[in-house]
Amino acid sequence: AQSVTQLGSHVSVSEGALVLLRCNYSSSVPPYLFWYVQYPNQGLQLLLKYTSAATLVKGINGFEAEFKKSETSFHLTKPSAHMSDAAEYFCAVSDRKIQGAQKLVFGQGTRLTINP
Amino acid sequence: DGGITQSPKYLFRKEGQNVTLSCEQNLNHDAMYWYRQDPGQGLRLIYYSQIVNDFQKGDIAEGYSVSREKKESFPLTVTSAQKNPTAFYLCASSTRGHLYNEQFFGPGTRLTVL
């Protein structure tokens, strides 16, 4: 079965500093990987996804992620943090298709705090 | 605007009561999902449906039930058999056919058992 591990349940950075959120996956087949963001008491919003077209994926709000097969990683980065980036971030892998639907397996989440 | 609506935003339940959470989408998506979110545990799949009048159990279906009588609606009932129902519940939908399709999420319902 496929799985996702997010290293660090809480990450704190200063405004303007580099953001790095770590995600490692386990998959026996080439994976489809996603990063979602969740603001307090809201649903999830897609930041970006890896579909094997390119290893460096650019998303919304200045975020990007690099797929590294050799390291089984899909870390999320942003060069300069903004106060509005404070949220919880989830990495997910698309598991097998289940009778036409898609099963997402989520990591535990990383809460990002931005210090002024 | 197309999207997913969930109601109510907050729900309080007494022990032993069944409650139903509403999920409606106007994205014309075939597939719909229910997730439960607990602190530090990410999201876990409760039920999913790929088409009207069909649904399947996810990883944590015990104590929950669903129906899919209309394409746009996928209500979730939390029954008295669910031992620890206090959580944040998220509904999502997607098109069918590809594993890389995006799932669109509703704003969630926070259920508290009194």
Image (cartoon, coloured by chain):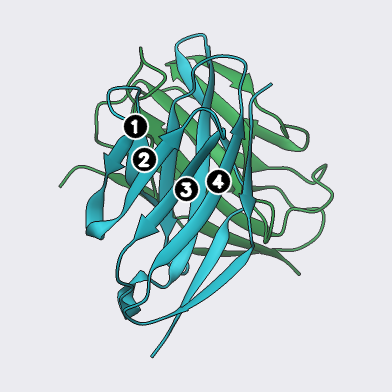
In the figure, is residue B95 to the left or right of A26?
left
Q: Colour of chain B?
A: green
Above or below, A54 against B3 in this view is above
Q: Earlier in the sequence, mark 3 or mark 4?
A: 4
Chain of the residue under the numbered disc 1 shown in the image:
A
Q: Residues within 10 Å of mark 2 (few under 14, many from 20)?
A: many
Above or below, A82 against B94 in this view is below
Whether labels 3 and 4 belong to a single chain: the reply is yes
Between label 1 and label 4, give the one nearer the viewer. Answer: 1
Q: Residue A98, percent across and down?
A: 54, 13
Amino acid found under the numbered disc labelled 3:
His
Whether labels 1 and 2 belong to a single chain: the reply is no
Instruction: Examine the image and state in which quarter residue B94 appears.
Output: top left
Q: Is disc 3 in contact with disc 1, using a CB cutoff of under 8 Å? A: no
Chain of the residue under the numbered disc 2 shown in the image:
B
Secondary structure, mark 3, is strand
Separation of disc 1 and disc 4 at Cα?
Answer: 15 Å
Q: Residues within 10 Å of mark 4 (few under 14, many from 20)?
A: many
Between label 1 and label 2, give the one nearer the viewer. Answer: 1
Instruction: Examine the image and state in which quarter residue A19 appears.
Output: bottom left
Q: Which mark is residue A75?
A: 3
Q: Colour of chain A?
A: cyan
Q: Residues within 10 Å of mark 1 (few under 14, many from 20)?
A: some
Amino acid found under the numbered disc labelled 2:
Glu
Please give the residue where the numbered disc 2 appears in the rendered image: B24
Separation of disc 1 and disc 2 at Cα?
Answer: 35 Å
Between label 3 and label 2, give the one nearer the viewer. Answer: 3
Q: Which mark is residue A23?
A: 4
Q: Residues within 10 Å of mark 3 (few under 14, many from 20)?
A: some
Amino acid found under the numbered disc labelled 4:
Cys
